[in-house]
Amino acid sequence: MISITKPIRKNLLLFSIGIVYIWFGLLKFSPGLSPAENLAKQTIHILFFGLIPSDVSILLLAIWETVIGVLLIANIYRKITVLLALIHITLTFSPLFLLPDQVFNGAPFMLTLVGQYIIKNFIIIAVLISIY
């Protein structure tokens, strides 16, 4: 059995979640590359009552996600970064309630690919809490 020390495990978690955040964030800088772009734009439009233009909202989201990723990998301002990530990841669940037609296929437990994309965020929440 391989024994990995606690600091190494924590650094692996910081790095892996940081990579995910950077990857998803960078995709949003180029229109049409992120599979979540339209969902994100629609959700932000609803959450902010249409006050933020969709092109601006996706750019702000791209910056937010990329900065979180960089800070996690650099392991600086960890507690603040984890809190920002938890706020972000919690908001990713809002389409479950705001846009259910895009998340569910018929019965409540039949998820679309978008729904599966959202539900996997429970894993990210668990990791963020463990590295806090």
Image: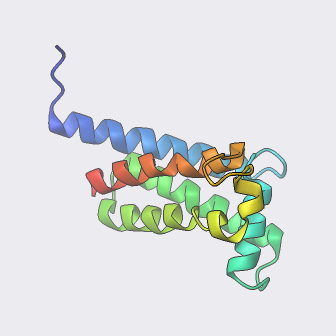
Is the C terminus in the top left, top right, bottom left or bottom right quadrant? bottom left
Is the N terminus in the top left, top right, bottom left or bottom right quadrant? top left
Above or below: residue 55 compared with residue 51: above
Tag count: 0
Above or below: residue 80 compared with residue 13: below
Residue 131 in percent (x, y) is at 28, 51
Quarter-wise, where is residue 53 in the image? bottom right
Quarter-wise, where is residue 83 in the image? bottom left
Work out whether residue 35 or residue 104 is closer to the camera in this orientation and state it: 104
Work out whether residue 99 or residue 89 is closer to the camera in this orientation and state it: 99
Horizontally, residue 87 falls left or right of residue 31, namely left
Residue 117 in percent (x, y) is at 62, 46
Above or below: residue 67 compared with residue 44: above
Residue 25 in percent (x, y) is at 63, 52
Q: Residue at x 77, y 71 (%)?
A: 56
Horizontally, residue 77 falls left or right of residue 113, namely left
Residue 14 in percent (x, y) is at 36, 45
Work out whether residue 106 or residue 120 is closer to the camera in this orientation and state it: 106
The color scheme shown is rainbow
Q: Residue at x 15, y 31 (%)?
A: 5
Q: Residue at x 56, y 47 (%)?
A: 22
Q: Residue at x 70, y 53 (%)?
A: 104
